[in-house]
Amino acid sequence: MSIHPTAIVHESAKIGKNVTIGPYTIIGKKTTIGDNTFIGPHCVIENTQMGQNNEIIASAFIGVKPQDLSYDGMESMVVIGSGNQIRECVTIHRSTSLERPTKVGDKCLFMANSHVAHDCVIGSNVILVNSAGVAGHVEIQNNAILSGLSAVHQFVRIGRLSMLSGLSGLVLDLPPFCRATGTRAKLAGLNTVGMRRGGLSRDAVKAVKEAYRVLFLSKNTLRESIERLKKTNPPPEVTEIINFCENSKRGITSARKRGAGAGADDEQ
């Protein structure tokens, strides 16, 4: 263990083996830091349970109180997995209730100045590029990517292996495997590169492409398209999209009009 003399570690904090804590960093109350974690200078970490092998570069604020005017100081937490990279000036705020902590999975990359608000649930292998911002109560599933300067409205869900383009604002749910772009983001095809890198077979990618056309490019309603797909005995990846759409509370992001980058074959 290596703790710089200028660092402040609360007496209740639990620090694992081979942990480095840099200059002027504050480790607050109700905090657990797992083994082999590096924490650079000028960080503030409190009310956080953190796994092993995380790297926090500098000036990150994790577990500080939420930016929610209704928050009354109740006990709450951030729970972070293992193997995450948290870069300069990242903020991850604790939840508004103890029962449902803000959560981050494993092996995520939060680039400089990215923000995760209170009550979010972030999966594993998620990437938030520089200055991407996620509002409260957002769910981001595994292997999703939020590009630079993108923003996500509160309570939005983002599906597995999906991608939000830079400078985009997402206000409705983004289904698995899809790409979205625009100030008020619209679907703009599939993240086919991400699907291949994620291990989907050619047959699975082909099935998802056809499902995209049926669900988002046809003249039928989304409900009609879902019922049509259900009758085809769809593969697991298509069933995943169907279930995601059926469980949406905010609504599903619609596709851009034909001729405006809406093709299902578009790559990231």
Image (cartoon, rainbow, N blue to C red):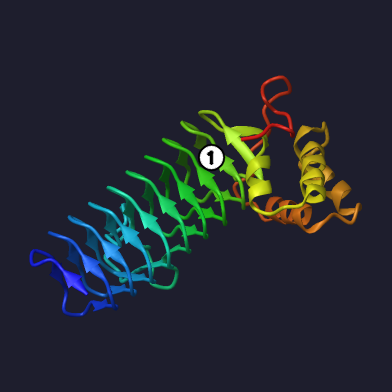
In which image quadrant can residue 54 be found?
bottom left
- Residue 35 percent location from the top left of the image: 33, 75
- Residue 121 percent location from the top left of the image: 48, 60
Q: Front-most of 261 and 254?
A: 261
In this view, 167 is above or below 62: above
Q: Residue at x 43, y 67 (%)?
A: 82
Q: Quadrant of the N terminus?
A: bottom left
- Residue 170 percent location from the top left of the image: 53, 38
Q: Residue at x 22, y 73 (%)?
A: 29
Residue 176 in view of the camera: no
Q: Quadrant of the C terminus?
A: top right
Q: Residues within 10 Å of mark 1 (few under 14, many from 20)?
A: many
In the image: residue 67, left or right of residue 159: left
Q: Residue at x 88, y 47 (%)?
A: 228
In this view, 224 is above or below 91: above
In the image: residue 46, left or right of residue 181: left
Q: Residue at x 18, y 56 (%)?
A: 41
Q: Amino acid at mark 1?
A: Val
For disc 1, the marked residue is 171
Indicate the secondary structure of the residue bearing disc 1.
Answer: loop
**The furthest residue to the top:** 259
